[in-house]
Image (cartoon, rainbow, N blue to C red):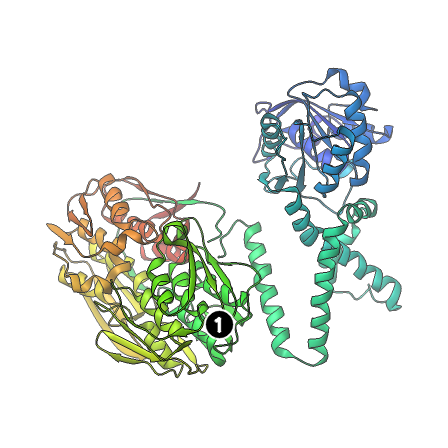
């Protein structure tokens, strides 16, 4: 059989530039053979050579086209190896040391040496034993790919496509050698990551070595101890899927268990402890404990699936960036319902967790920000079923029932989560830490930390009052009379939530009205909250009782389509079940002041929140000076409103909106820059912007990782004369996971482009 035994990879065609000279593989099994075949197929090395002990293995490797030639020993090849060549050690873990001795005796220090062993600590110790120190030429690595099949006949040139390879370079590792190894793995389609040797062995001990130990033990238990001859005959698919890895090479896994003994024992001890607790729960019929284990496990497994598929979970743990490409013109028509209100979704999880009894939620927003809140409370021991099609069931633990999380609470890009949750965590008996992504790390947190400190909390922030927040538990809180220095629903809610745990009365006075979802929902959970104009107050020591919540459609999400219908001639769009809380309707008031044809119908109250259907038809808009009393009522909607201003006749002036500069991005500057790109006169000011409406062109606009910037420029295309490319629209999932679907449904020409 010739080199054509392996067909060309569809994603990495042959004929590329070589990234190394010779590749010498010691151990032509699945791992080593697949790397050789992959590089050979793609033209990424000048020659592939296999070092084999058995002539039959060499014959098969040549026949299959895995390598160009074979050799019986490294000593035979050593004289022809030099700088730019790579030796890949792919033998069982406990056999690595003997290969290293041969390398030490005959291979030049200019040759790059790497490996594929599953345990890095044992390889590091072996290298240091043989060489006396770690030579710069060594780059320890581990491809996270494999199969229960083994041997050279299992070699697959595409095995590493879209799989991860972990490198564990040491301080002594030479830069040129590290880059050479990185290049060969990337050439075969792998994603290359780096971590320390110790972290690698701990992580792999838990995620790979422990599952193999359990699978081998389970199959051995059933085969040897159950004694029923039909045990395998009637085993279901779950048994097949779980125990597949028990068909792996026993010798290899024998070596791995011995080489990573410490980490495997730690993982086994933890698993045995948890399994013992699970057994106890089954024995005493503790349904709450069982449900908690199963729901947490399902969420974690779904998270793992999303990571493998490079989808976001919270978690903004997004691993692949996307752009939007929009064609100019069009109109929006039809009837749609946008996702549930994000602010109410956050609060439903928080208060439902702190309530006594079960809280059932309908219409929960399954976006990344709200999911981050949900995951954080799961991490603190709350049993939460779902979400499933917007339905969530929360088994509340009461105000004092949260448990210390085992790790820092990661909440992605969600400013609402970190600010509101800091108030709750300030009243807990345990220490906690909240962190997020790069964008969140830039946002100011002293505005919540300072009033919490006045209440007696101990809150530490990073430099400049930025996340992460570290909150010391066990601090007695006292009620305060706090006057907000600037209108902020998040700060108000933080202080009120801390007040649940404070002695005495907590009172918050705001300089202008802000959204009052927290006060309304606390009342719905049976907690007494007094509201008198600008003042909201409550007294600590009460309790929340589980309830039912129906989340209305989010007016912030509806805003993009309200503006779209207002600016595109021929549009006629109805948005159903939209929340019209009086503290959130600034966008409606502002659009109507600009001349929008916008009407409300079917107004009603659902779960304490007013909702309505909103019909918007195209009408020419005019520029206005936006009243400052409307700014807090529309603070999140201004990016979309800036697009309306760009399409209006005359000048629109916004003042009193300095808060926009410290959102997910500096939204004033980001929108001004994007509008300039499209040919619109937009002049930012310290606390606002001046926009002069006019003809809109096209071009590429930056989002600065801000979901609202991305969606705003997407709807701008309806009035553009040229295509618009919105760069990095990945974070739209944080608030509006169905934005693209609804855009296409209503008539916006939007294409998603992978970056």
Residue neighbourhood size for the residue with mark 1, other residues' Cα within 10 Å, grouped as few (<14), some (14–19), many (≥20): many
Where does residue 388 sit, x and y in percent of width and height? Answer: 50, 68
Please say whether residue 564 is visible from this viewpoint. no
Which of 61 and 109 lies nearest the eye of the viewer?
109
**The N terminus lies in which quarter of the figure?**
top right
Left or right: 563, with 101 as reference point:
left
**The C terminus lies in which quarter of the figure?**
top left
Where does residue 549 sit, x and y in percent of width and height? Answer: 41, 77
Where does residue 493 sit, x and y in percent of width and height? Answer: 34, 69
Where does residue 449 sit, x and y in percent of width and height? Answer: 37, 62
Which of 139 and 510 lies nearest the eye of the viewer?
510
Where residue 613 sits, quadrant-wise, is bottom left
Q: Residue at x 50, y 52 (%)?
A: 311
Identity of the residue furthest to the top in this view: 79
Instruction: Name the element at disc 1.
Output: strand
Up the image or down, 229 lies above or below 174; here it is: below
Please say whether residue 476 is visible from this viewpoint. yes
- The residue that disc 1 covers is 392
Q: Residue at x 15, y 52 (%)?
A: 648
Left or right: 608, with 411 as reference point:
left
Q: Residue at x 25, y 39 (%)?
A: 677
Which of 110 and 324 lies nearest the eye of the viewer?
110
Where residue 306 sits, quadrant-wise, is bottom right
Left or right: 500, with 558 as reference point:
right
Q: Residue at x 73, y 23 (%)?
A: 68
Up the image or down, 216 lies above or below 614; here it is: above
């Amino acid at each position: 059989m010739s080199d054509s035994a392996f067909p060309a990879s569809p994603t990495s065609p042959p004929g590329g530039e070589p990234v190394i000279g010779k590749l010498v593989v010691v151990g032509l099994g699945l791992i080593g053979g697949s790397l050789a075949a992959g590089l050979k197929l793609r033209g990424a090395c000048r020659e592939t050579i296999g070092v084999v002990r058995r002539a039959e293995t060499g014959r098969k490797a040549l026949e299959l086209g895995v390598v160009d030639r074979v050799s019986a020993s490294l000593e035979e090849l050593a004289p022809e190896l030099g700088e730019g060549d790579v030796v890949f050690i792919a033998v069982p873990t406990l056999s690595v040391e003997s290969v290293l001795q041969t390398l030490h005796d005959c291979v030049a220090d200019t040759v790059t040496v790497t490996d594929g062993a599953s345990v890095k600590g044992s390889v590091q110790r072996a290298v240091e034993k043989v060489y006396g120190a770690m030579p710069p030429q060594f780059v320890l690595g581990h491809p996270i790919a494999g199969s229960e099949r083994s041997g050279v006949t299992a070699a697959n040139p595409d095995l590493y496509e879209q799989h991860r390879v972990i490198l564990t370079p040491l301080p002594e590792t030479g830069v040129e050698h590290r880059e050479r190894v990185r290049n060969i793995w990337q050439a075969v389609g792998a994603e290359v990551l780096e971590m320390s040797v110790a972290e690698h062995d701990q992580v792999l001990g838990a995620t790979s070595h422990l599952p193999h130990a359990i699978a081998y033990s389970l199959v051995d238990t059933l085969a040897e101890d159950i004694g029923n001859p039909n045990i395998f005959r009637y085993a279901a698919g779950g048994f097949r899927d779980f125990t597949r890895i028990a068909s792996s090479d026993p010798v290899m896994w024998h070596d791995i268990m011995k080489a990573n003994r410490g980490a495997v024992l730690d993982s086994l001890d933890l698993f045995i402890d948890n399994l013992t607790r699970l057994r106890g729960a089954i024995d005493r019929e503790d349904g709450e404990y069982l449900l908690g284990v199963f729901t947490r496990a399902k969420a974690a497994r779904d998270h793992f699936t999303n990571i493998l598929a490079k989808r976001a979970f919270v978690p903004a743990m997004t691993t692949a960036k996307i752009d939007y490409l929009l064609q100019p013109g069009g109109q929006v028509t039809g009837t749609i319902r946008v996702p549930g209100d994000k602010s109410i979704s956050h609060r439903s999880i928080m208060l439902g967790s702190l309530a006594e009894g079960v809280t059932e939620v309908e219409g929960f927003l399954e976006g990344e920000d709200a999911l981050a809140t949900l995951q954080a409370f799961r991490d603190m021991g709350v049993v939460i079923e779902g979400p499933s099609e917007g339905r969530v069931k929360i088994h509340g633990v009461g105000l004092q029932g949260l448990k210390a999380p085992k790790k820092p609470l990661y909440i992605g890009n969600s400013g609402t989560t970190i600010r509101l949750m800091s108030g709750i965590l300030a009243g807990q008996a345990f220490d906690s830490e909240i962190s997020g992504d790069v964008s969140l790390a830039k946002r100011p947190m002293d505005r919540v930390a300072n009033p919490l400190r006045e209440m007696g909390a101990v809150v530490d922030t990073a430099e400049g009052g930025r996340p992460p927040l570290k909150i010391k538990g066990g601090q007695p809180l006292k009620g305060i009379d706090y006057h907000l220095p600037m209108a902020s629903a998040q700060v108000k809610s933080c202080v009120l939530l801390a007040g649940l745990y404070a002695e005495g009365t907590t009172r918050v006075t705001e300089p202008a009205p802000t959204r009052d979802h927290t006060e309304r929902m606390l009342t719905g959970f049976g907690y007494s909250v007094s509201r008198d104009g600008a003042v909201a107050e409550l007294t600590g020591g009460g309790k929340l009782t589980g309830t039912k919540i129906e989340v209305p459609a989010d007016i912030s999400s509806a805003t993009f389509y309200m503006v779209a219908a207002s600016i595109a001639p021929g549009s006629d769009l109805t948005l159903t079940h939209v929340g019209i809380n009086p503290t959130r309707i600034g966008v409606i008031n502002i659009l109507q002041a600009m001349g929008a044809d916008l009407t409300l119908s079917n107004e009603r109250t659902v779960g304490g929140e007013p909702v309505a259907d909103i019909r918007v038809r195209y009408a020419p808009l005019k520029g206005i000076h936006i009243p400052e009393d409307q700014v807090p009522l529309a603070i999140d909607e201004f990016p979309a409103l800036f697009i309306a201003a760009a399409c209006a006749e005359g000048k629109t002036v916004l003042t009193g909106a300095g808060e926009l500069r410290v959102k997910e991005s500096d939204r004033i500057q980001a929108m001004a820059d994007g509008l300039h790109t499209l040919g619109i006169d937009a002049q930012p000011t310290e606390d606002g912007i001046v926009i002069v409406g006019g003809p809109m062109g096209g071009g590429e606009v930056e989002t600065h990782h801000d979901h609202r910037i991305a969606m705003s420029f997407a709807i701008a295309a309806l009035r553009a004369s040229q295509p618009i490319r919105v760069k990095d629209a990945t974070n739209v999932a944080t608030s509006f996971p169905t934005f693209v679907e609804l855009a296409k449904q209503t008539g916006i020409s939007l294409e998603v482009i992978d970056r």
